[in-house]
Image (tube, rainbow, N blue to C red):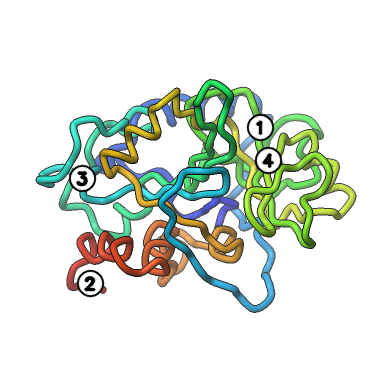
Amino acid sequence: SDDGGGGGGGGAPDERGGESDALAAFRKQLQRQMSGEGGASASPLGRAGPADLWASPRDSIEPGVVLLADYTRWVENKARRSADVPFDQFALRGPLPADLPPDMVARVLPVVILLAKGADGSHDALLLERRTGILLGDIKGNEYACAPINALLFGGTAARESVQVLAQYEGRAAPAGLTSLSPGIGFGPWSVAKQHIEQGTISGSRSFVFAGKTVFGKGELERQMAADLWKAAYLSRDVLFKERSEPSMRKGSIPLWREALELCDGEHAQVVKELYGDEL
């Protein structure tokens, strides 16, 4: 991700992209914690070795699964758009305009990674590819000094005071205090991840830091899946943590939403073809 955005692919779209005022307000709240002028964006992601790029479709919803919005349900003027799409839950004003460039749509469509299922039947998740426009080094104090050029990402509209980290790790087991989601991918609170970054157990350059999280209430995600709002898949860590630049920074960067669905092939890839049409 270009900015540490877990992905990282799309900064905030313009108003035609459909993003709500919630994210703008959230940015202002965070900026009040900063001292001085915000620095320019920089990529916190280091270069990995040979890429192992794969994605595998899933029918089940469990921790580690990535949910990718079905384009046909989230864009206006689509016959199959559901009346129950939770736009507000993902800081969107409403259906995405149908005439937006495909890459912009792909960067705005929600992509979330499931973290845990609660005893009450709720699901915790992190919204990927949403920047706040703030780098950790911009925040007052030394709390985030070990990862100053990581972008602070918007993980969702719930628990906005919490800071979670999605990190790549080596070896079979996740470092102490982090929960493994799938091979090489773990998550945990900033307080734990910070220690591992300082000790070199995990790399700040291969970690995404989120303020807030996404919560699906009891039965909510199951209803959304039944309404075909999402395509579910496991992603390799090289897909999830791949560096992705904004169009204004470098051409040719494929949005996480598009790449993951194309790697799945089959019905998942068909959603991409419906969005991009002849541009593929």
Which numbered circle lies on residue 163?
1
Q: Earlier in the sequence, mark 3 or mark 1?
A: 3
Q: Are marks 3 and 4 in contact (CB under 8 Å)?
A: no
What's under tag 4, amino acid-wise? Leu
Q: Residue furthest right?
A: 199
What's under tag 3, amino acid-wise? Val
Where's residue 211, x and y in %? 59, 32
Relative to 174, residue 143 above or below: above
What's under tag 2, amino acid-wise? Glu
Secondary element type, mark 3:
loop
| Residue at the (22%, 52%) spot, across then down | 100
Q: Is residue 51 left or right of residue 270?
A: right
| Residue at the (50%, 26%) spot, across then down | 122
Which one is in front, 221 or 98?
A: 221
Where's residue 110, x and y in %? 39, 44
Task: Give neighbour class at mark 3: few <14, some 14-19, many 20+ (Cα, 10 Å).
Answer: many
Question: What residue is shown with label 4?
Answer: 136
Q: Earlier in the sequence, mark 3 or mark 4?
A: 3
Where's residue 270, x and y in %? 26, 64
Question: What residue is shown with label 2?
Answer: 279
Relative to 116, residue 73 above or below: below
Question: What residue is shown with label 3?
Answer: 75
Q: Is residue 186 left or right of residue 197?
A: left
